[in-house]
Image: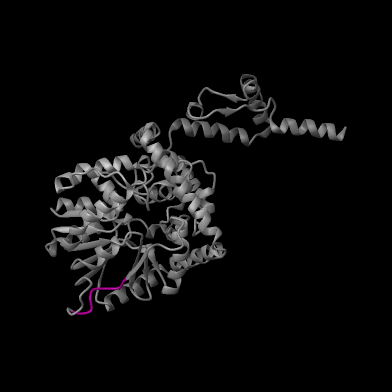
Amino acid sequence: MNTASTEFRKRVRMALADDELQHAMGRAKGGFVLNRQKAIAEFPEFHQMTDAARDIKDHVLMNLDLYLEIYEKKVLENGGQVHWARTAEEASTIVEGLCRRSGARKITKGKSMVSEEINLNEKLEKSGMQVIETDLGEYIVQLASEKPSHIIAPAVHKTRNQISKLFYKHHKPMGYADKVSERKEIVQQARSVLRNHFVESDIGITGANFLIAETGSSVIVTNEGNGDLTSVLPRMQIVVAGIEKVIPSLEDLSVFLRVLARSATGQEISAYTSLYSGPRANHADEEGPEQYHVVLVDNGRSSMLGSEYQSMLRCIRCGACLNHCTVYNVIGGHAYGSIYPGPMGSVLTPLIDGHENNTDLANACTLNGLCRTICPVHIPLPDLLRNHRTQQQRRKLTPFTGRFFFAIWVYLVRRPHFYQIVLALPIWVLNRVGRKSGVIKRIPLANGWTNSRDFPCPSAQTFQRQWRAEMRKFNA
């Protein structure tokens, strides 16, 4: 077993044994799912909107170069600048260079998964800059020296008690002597601490939910308003976004806004939807940055175009597949060992970071198909995960024992009569072992299954044997 597989399984075991994590995940998953169901039930046109969103994304991906050129032209016309980054390292270097040349000391950031992908905070901090996350969830995980565990709820793995302890530890030196434990108190203290950072910030960095080619605008969708303060108050605004975020027009944006919030949090619409198109028009303007930069990140995305994985570029980062995933809701996001967890991350991470270091992600899935059903842009996630498994098998990246087992299985299923003969004895034995209780507690070579669940007792005969017996009775 390679080192990556060993580390993955170690993280999974730790997650399963973490009582506080299990408590936090148990409380979170129901709310997301039930709120989404309610929001969709109140919007009969939801599925028509998801079809439209899929079609818009497919159209853009077929003409991505054209729409990116249109978007860049509009940004330049609006007084901004566009920077192109082929890799994560190149993207973080571009942002670091912009910050360093401006003499920035303090940087506020809105929530941005792409900035996590390119490891931006570490790059800026190594250059001596102070980076402050302003999204409450991101701020919490920053205090904990952790990465986000969910793409829309970064601190979903934290209990309120853990957050209370974090705030007391980090805010007490600032003069906050009382330990806050109620939700309103926690939010109010975070606002109070972050207020000065917003005012003192030299540069604001945000991601983008969408980029509008028609107007050259970047769109951020939030529930806290921190993205607006991050974008408007500093003298320079930097937007970091993947190249797949571009969509044609404002009319198309209205389609995505109708499906995004409902899929993500079960809201009809998020509290704040903000569009930014460039720096302030002139020095007389009281609001807006003096400089506006957009960094467009490829980092493996262009290699997906025209491939069997192109549909992954439709993803609007709503997090619905995570919220409904039976595996994610048990092990949490950090167990995946990547920035993007859950079903979408299990597909995306090997495409960005390579299969060699991420062989377990595609296999840590039940393939129950629920993620495909709830995806608002109809990404066939189970099919893409099966594609990953096939690639790993062909490249012999999976453990030898697994390949050996499946080679035997393939040999048998291609010979049905032999397959039935081979299965008859073990099925009969399992039936004898478990027929009194109806379940089997332990199966040799299958502890991975029976350590956490019971195996249902099989019938004494295979289905095909039972079928032939019934047919003989029917024809007699």
Image point (53%, 59%), residue name: 40
**Is residue 308 shown above or below 430?**
below
Residue at 18% over, 58% down:
197
Question: What are the residue bounds of the magenta stretch?
Answer: 276-282
Front residue of 337/301: it is 337
Q: Is residue 322 visible?
A: yes
| Quadrant occupied by the N terminus | top left
- Dominant secondary structure, magenta: loop
Residue 382 location in percent, x, y?
51, 48
User: Residue at coordinates 52% horizontally, 30% vertically from top-left?
Assistant: 453
Residue 45, percent from left and from top:
56, 65
Q: Position of residue 459 (x, y in %)?
A: 68, 27
Which quadrant holds residue 105?
A: bottom left
Q: Quadrant of the C terminus?
A: top right
The spot of residue 49 in percent (x, y) is 52, 65
* Residue 395 in sight in this render: no
Judge left or right: residue 77 versus residue 391. left
* Above or below: residue 58 compared with residue 10: below
